[in-house]
Image (tube, rainbow, N blue to C red):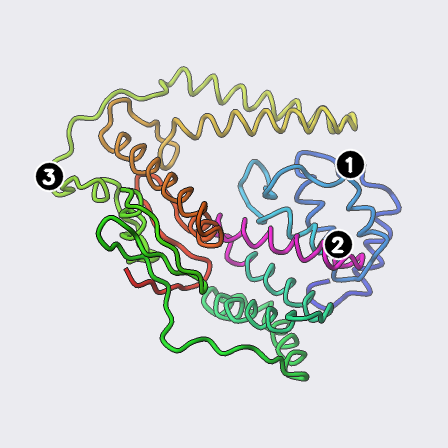
Amino acid sequence: AETGGVDEASGLLTALVARGFDRLRDRNWPASWFQLARCAALAGDRDTAARLLEPSHVPTEHCVQVSLATVCLGATDLARAWLLHTCGDLDAAAQGYAAAAEINARVGARSWLVETRCGHARLLVDRDGPGDRMEARRLLGPAVSTAEAIGLRSIEPELARLRDRLDAEPATAPATPAGSRPRFVRTGSMWELDYSGTAVQVPHHRGLTDLAALLARPGQEVPVLELLGTDTRTPAPARGAPALDERARRELRDRLADLDADVSEAEANNDIARATAVREERQRLAEAVARDLGLGGRPRLVGDPVERARKTVSTRIRRAIRVVDGVHPELGRHLDRSVDTGAWCAYRPAEPVTWIT
């Protein structure tokens, strides 16, 4: 379908759907569902799209993963938006594209973020309501630049078609004030924050200083010891014992394997409720394990100064973002999506932002 053989793909899809989805309901069903949704959208197959939107078929995961996360296909909401778009529910599809963009930007799925923005822009041109064309143009800008940056050539024809559709009937957009730039500046005991045309003030909080340091260095990883004020040039203190010993890690691996087997068994028996419950249990266990592991799956160390700094800095950054969200929700959402915390922290916006700090 993606290479232009839509009629052939549509025939294959129809034959596959006629046999039912049961034989596809294995551990990789979310990925199969995602690809079926993609094909149904490209083929304009409303009947298949409606079937795939049935609650019993839609995956519960936020992101579609293949083979225990060997591959990530980005946000599940993107495929749901494709299906809703195909079925003609444009308002719900628009919400799906927005949700998918937020997740794909947050996890760094750049190619799927381009696909999300492209699909959203296409929907806006199709809907053509007040402000839709202007918003479509806003989405296409970063989509085109990111596609060029990562060499995503396959989407270039679709981006060109969308530009042509927009150029056929120019949209009027208000001019952006010259020289306007977002601000994140401390003045005495207060911080002046200006983003997307809204300016607010908040009292000083140490996490705001951390955020300002990250905003001033977009895309750069900053060690937490630097944010904490520790001299990173001095030798590190002795590091402690692992939070998880080898026996505990082995038992956790065995438990995860058992849960995977339970999911496969439930799906083989078409017990969707049990499969969903087991997947959720596995996700909770995996998240708990992740909290005790560092980069590359290495165990975090008890008494480790880097680990202490990570917890301190991460806590105050997240607390500062909540404070900002309380007075400037749009900026709060932007920071929550764009700031990564850990042993190294970074500000990685989905599209470039130049701050005055």
Camera-side mark, 3 or 2: 2
Q: Is residue 41 above or below residue 282?
A: below
Which is more N-terminal, label 1 or label 2?
Answer: 1
**Residue 84 disc label:** 2
Q: Is residue 309 above or below residue 76?
A: above
Q: Quadrant of the N terminus?
A: bottom right
Q: Is residue 179 left or right of residue 285?
A: left
Disc 2 secondary structure class? helix
Q: Is residue 320 left or right of residue 284?
A: left
Camera-side mark, 2 or 1: 2
Q: Which residue is mark 1?
A: 56
Viewer-side residue, 166 vs 258: 166
Residue at the spot 81% in from the left edge and 63% down from the top edge: 8
Q: Give the Cα separation between the discs numbered 1 and 3.
A: 57 Å
Q: Give the Cα separation between the discs numbered 3 and 2.
A: 56 Å
Amino acid type shown at disc 2? Leu
- Dot 1, crowdedness within 10 Å: few (<14), some or many (≥20)? few
Q: Is residue 33 above or below residue 279?
A: below
Residue interval drawn in magenta: 85-111
Where residue 278 sits in the image (x, y, percent)?
A: 64, 24
